Amino acid sequence: MTSAARDFDWKPLALVPALALLVLPFVGSPSTWLTLTVAGLAMGMIIFIIASGLTLVFGLMDVLNFGHGVFIALGAFVATSVLGAMGDYTQSADLWRNLLAVLPAMLVAMAVAGAVGLAFERFIVRPVYGQHLKQILITMGGMIIGEELIKVIWGPAQIPLPLPEGMRGSLLVGDAAIEKYRLVAVAVGLLVFAVLAWVLSRTKVGLLIRAGVQDREMVESLGYRIRRLFVGVFVVGSALAGLGGVMWGLYQQNVVPQMGAQVNVLIFIVIIIGGLGSTGGALIGALLVGLMANYTGFLAPKVALFSNIALMVAILLWRPQGVYPVANR
Amino acid sequence: MTSTNHNAGNLLELKGVHTHIGAYHILHGVHLAVPKGQLTMLLGRNGAGKTTTLRTIMGLWHASQGTVHFGGKDITALNTPQIAGMNIAYVPENMGIFADLTVKENMLLAARSARNAAQMDEARLQWIFRLFPAVEKFWNHPAGKLSGGQKQMVAVSRAIVEPRDLLIVDEPSKGLAPAIINNMIEAFDQLKKSGVTILLVEQNINFAKRLGDTVAVMDNGKVVHAGSMAALAEDEALQRSLLGLAL
């Protein structure tokens, strides 16, 4: 075993299968449990895509961006326009033709969310560096303005975002029905995590981000301009939120301008559970939140909303800094 | 940037530097000269302003008055990355080790010209490994898992992973065992011989005596004595009046 593997803290990772196995007796039917688990993992992966950028934004510059949700909504609405214009591709039963529509929708949503993120950082976040209260107020204000602008462009009503034909329906695994789109969501989430993990561990920019999350003053003392790095992370984080918005919109099959605010609560729970600034922690947190939401939605719908707060409280009682606290913070 | 009013023999010069941190006035007109190619010791009691002086040089706190010249250029208003980019390495009092990164990754970050570990100067790395064998031994270990002495070795190694014109180190012997301090003294002695200019804050008198060429003593945010280390080491009365003890 390598020293890195030996030093790795496996306990938080074990929480995900532990939670899944713990609820199995309560759910009873293995096929229902499998359906709920895949749904939970899919939801968790989408939340991870959205939360991964936000946790780095906080970790790197101590910026609390409560406006992150606006990029989710923006991405989803851009997807309605792109997919709406590609009806021939989305209505085809051929999965590959569907992907030829979904992929450009994701790329355009990421580009638009990233560009708006660049302006958001420059005009809304930059003037309030180091001032948490002002950050909370101004970024929430930015999100409200963003929502209103979305209403101006796309209208205030809910817009359907139907799944492309080839992604509808389920695969049968034994008696369990696994929705195809949930498998797509898990695959996209894993791909995003793999790319992020590769960049953070194998490239110098990634090293700088990880180092900056721990001690930005020392990174500057080594000669690197951390603000430039932060702008880059903010833009990528916004673009990922846009991608997450497309995924979330397709998951819900409709979009509303307030969807960002609705998801905001979940992503803050995720990054707090994960440890502020920790990408690996955000993945664990997102999977736990996704699973918990689906299990409680089935077992005790009345406590579904409360369940993730309870999960966060339980995790923080165990590890007050989150499951993977970032050193030096 | 200007290049007036400085001594060409000094690599670094502070003139009348005042620094405020919030409402507190910490430095009260510091005059400090660091001659090129020498090791300058900055001594003084706790709270004298030594660390603040180093942080002001690095642009981590900005001088409210006075000037800092490096290599004849006025760097007073520059930001920290610009100052570090002028070939100045800094080891802070807390060592600034990135605990979640391996020793190799810590070193790679300091090697600005290298994009990956393979591009680091191998001959220089071997030289560093001879100075600090622990750096090679724990190369792939998370730096946060090392002992205090090993972390300090990594911190100094990181500062010298590429040739720098000026090395600024804040209390390298702080909290270290005597055997490791001796190892550190030998390492700094070899660094001196390599020709690099060093500015070192120290509280360990033995450390200062064995390594210092020149010395500046601070008290109450001012340099109250500057001269040769050897002369201060021989003058017990002066030591008592400046530091409250004999070297």
Image (spheres, coloured by chain):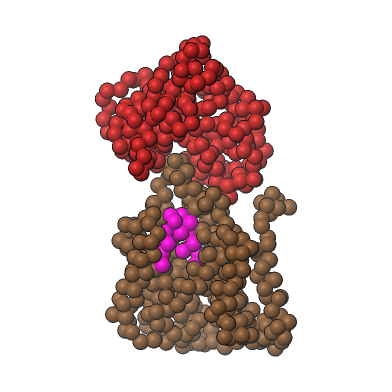
Chain colours: A brown, B red
* Residue B204, position as x, y percentages in the image: 56, 25
Q: Is residue A163 magenta?
A: no
Q: Residue at x 43, y 22 (%)?
A: B216
Q: Is residue B167 above or below residue B35?
A: below
Q: Is residue A58 magenta?
A: yes
In depth, the one of A207 and A187 nearer the eye is: A207
In depth, the one of A315 and A258 nearer the eye is: A315
Q: In this figure, what is the number of numbered marks?
A: 0
Q: Is residue B215 above or below residue B81?
A: above
Visible residue check, residue A185: yes
Visible residue check, residue A186: no
* Residue B223, position as x, y percentages in the image: 39, 24
Q: Is residue A140 above or below residue B94?
A: below
Q: Residue at x 46, y 54 (%)?
A: A60
Q: Is residue A210 left or right of residue A256?
A: right
Q: Residue at x 55, y 41 (%)?
A: B107
Range covered by the magenta-colored residues: A51-66
- Magenta portion: prevailing SS class: helix
